Image (spheres, rainbow, N blue to C red):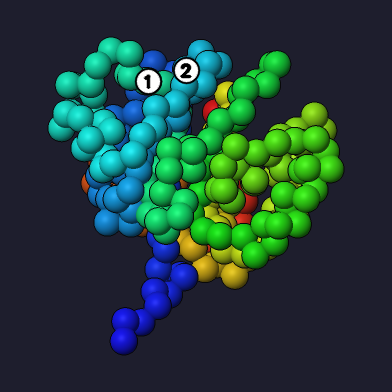
Amino acid sequence: MIAEPDKLHEECGVFGVFCNDKEQDAVPMICSGLFSLQHRGQEAAGIAAMKDNVLEVHKNMGLVSNVFPGESAFAQMPSDTKISGPAGIGHVRYAPSDTNTIENVQPFIIRLMHDSIAAAHNGSLTNAEAARELLEKSSIGLTSKSDCELILNLIVKDYKKDLLSALTDTIKFIKGSYALTILTKDALIGARDPNGIRPLCLGQFGEEKNGIPAGWILSSESCAIEAAGGKFIRDIEPGELVIINR
């Protein structure tokens, strides 16, 4: 008899980079991090990057090397799929067969009138149905079966208050296991579920000037931080919310 796979083994990987220098490109580092996290998900990969307040995303089915060909990040990538920016988030996806479709590939993005926001996450919500009902009552439609899209829309629903309030309200509402990365025009944000079921690490890179490094990294695993040329600092604490900005 073949044993049923443990739900907690349904892993994905998240990786985010924030450069303090607006002229530096975070995307090659994200690509390196995703290569190192490839064992966490082989079905799909994607990166969202923010440049000059414009949010771009490239994602597709397949391995990181298929979605982002070329060992030096985008050396061989067609020009229409190149993305860049001083801040971004990436994702590699492990998926059950019934959700292994392009609609469920992360990161998810929402473009607002004066801002855009992207999210990528690893985990699963135990109150996903309640979240869907809440969004439907607010006339917010969804395009996928992904819990990440649910979380992003919950944040955006209250975004008119302010970012911190929208984030904290959403995190108080959602239940389950998650390691969450969020990208806005001003910040890279990480959050970990209160029980610490899903891993999330903080790292930094570059020489420090006045005690401030060249930039920061959020990653599902510390090995990916080192693979991208960074230095592991610490684990994000269970229930902790980290906002990285200039």
Q: Nearer the viewer, residue 102 or 235?
A: 102
Q: Is residue 141 left or right of residue 87?
A: right
Q: Secondary structure at mark 1?
A: loop
| Number of numbered callouts drawn | 2
Sequence-wise, which precedes: disc 2 or disc 1?
2
Task: Give the amino acid at mark 1.
Answer: Ser
Q: Nearer the viewer, residue 246 or 221?
A: 221
Q: Residues within 10 Å of mark 2 (few under 14, many from 20)?
A: some
Q: Are marks 2 and 1 in contact (CB under 8 Å)?
A: yes
Between the residue at mark 2 and the residue at mark 1, the CA separation in whole angstroms equals 7 Å
* Disc number placed over residue 51 in the picture, else none: 2
Pick the quarter of the image with the N terminus: bottom left
Q: Is residue 185 left or right of residue 98?
A: right
Q: Is residue 72 shown above or below 171?
A: above
When asked about the image quadrant of residue 97, the answer is bottom left
Name the residue: 45% across, 30% down: 48
When asked about the image quadrant of residue 162, the answer is top right
Pick the quarter of the image with the C terminus: top right
Q: Is residue 37 visible?
A: no
Q: Nearer the viewer, residue 98 or 54?
A: 98
* Disc number placed over residue 183 in the picture, else none: none
* Disc number placed over residue 84 in the picture, else none: 1
Residue 137, percent across and down? 84, 43
